[in-house]
Image (tube, grey):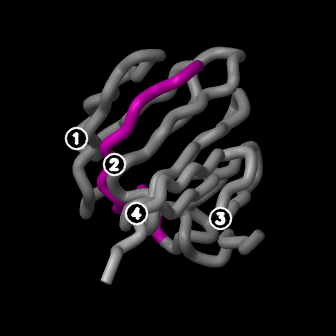
Amino acid sequence: MVRMLQVILKRFENPDEVRTFEKGKFELVHIGGMTIGRATYAPGWKWSQHVAPSAGTSRCQVGHVGLVLSGRATAAMEDGTVTEMKPGDLFFVPPGPPGHDSWVVGDEPYVSLHFVGAGDYAAQKTSKMR
């Protein structure tokens, strides 16, 4: 029996799923047994204001490993530590509880890729299948 190997290509321009919320969206692509997400947030976006109501928690409880593509955002921990992330930064934000908040810094949209935690992020009522 000959096993057929195939290269699979996907693009975020045609994601498998899009989760939308005020001032942002989170696009998911399922590939190679992984779920990879692309976060796009407008200036003024803040997790505790725009995602928390549908998530049912005051802070994000999902852990993240990702890469900032453009813009700037923060990871704000419960202990008051605020870390700003900028283009080119690879980041790890630990899962909660107690969780973390996040917001866009400045007037440029923020875009990042998420390699860990993408499947669970903003998965509650905001999920919209495409």
Q: Residue furthest bottom?
A: 1
Measured as percent of width and height from the top left, residue 36 is found at: 46, 53
Is 82 placed left or right of 106 in the picture?
Answer: left
**For residue 50: magenta?**
no
Q: How many marks?
A: 4
Residue corresponding to mark 4 = 5
SS category of the residue bearing label 1: loop
Measured as percent of width and height from the top left, residue 113 is found at: 48, 39
SS category of the residue bearing label 4: loop
Q: Earlier in the sequence, mark 4 or mark 3?
A: 4
Q: Earlier in the sequence, mark 1 or mark 2?
A: 2
Residue corresponding to mark 1 = 79
Badge 4: how crowded within 10 Å, few (<14), some, or many (20+)? few
Residue corresponding to mark 3 = 16
Q: CA distance from mark 1 to mark 4?
A: 49 Å
Quadrant for the N terminus, please. Answer: bottom left
